[in-house]
Image: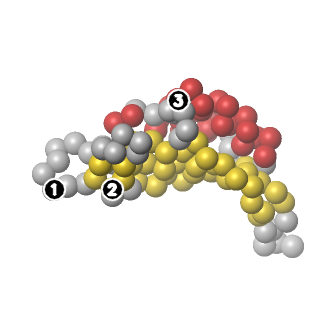
Amino acid sequence: MSQVQIVRVYTTEHAGALEPILRCLHDECRVRGVTVFRGISGFGASGRMHEARWTDLSLDLPLVIEFFDEPERAAAARKAIGELVSAGHILYWSATVEHLDD
């Protein structure tokens, strides 16, 4: 077993942060892996709803970008993407990875 840090980033499609964040995490930080979740509805501090409707021509849906890595590498990645994300939109916590090969 090993200790890791899970990082979750909240943004929206229109924020334009997805591609720069993914490039940074892949090319510069080289984290273990990233998953992007696309929400069907959500709202933030503004209270403005972001949701999918049949009448919408363009979508501004919530996005959650999540990854995990060793604590030091995850901390460096958080720092690297910090300027691409609004304050208060990055969460992280410790977890344990079970090595299935043991």
Q: Quadrant of residue 97?
A: bottom right
The crowd level at tag 3 (other Cα within 10 Å; few <14, some 14-19, many 20+) is some
Residue at the disc numbered 2: 41
Percent from the top left, x then y, of residue 79?
67, 31
Q: Amino acid at mark 3?
A: Leu
Front residue (pair 2, 88): 88
Mark-to-mark CA distance, 1 and 3: 30 Å
Q: Secondary structure at mark 1?
A: loop
Q: Name which of mark 1 and mark 3 comes first in the sequence.
A: 1
Measuring from the top left, give residue 43's x and y in whole percent.
37, 49
Residue 77 placement (x, y as % from top left): 67, 37
Dot 2 lies on which element? strand
Locate residue 102 relative to residue 67 in the image: left or right: right
Q: Secondary structure at mark 3?
A: helix
Image quadrant holding the N terminus, namely bottom right
Residue at x-position 54% and y-position 53% = 35
Q: Residues within 10 Å of mark 2 (few under 14, many from 20)?
A: some
Q: Which residue is mark 1?
A: 54
Q: Earlier in the sequence, mark 1 or mark 2?
A: 2
Q: Is residue 53 left or right of residue 19?
A: left
Q: Residues within 10 Å of mark 1 (few under 14, many from 20)?
A: few
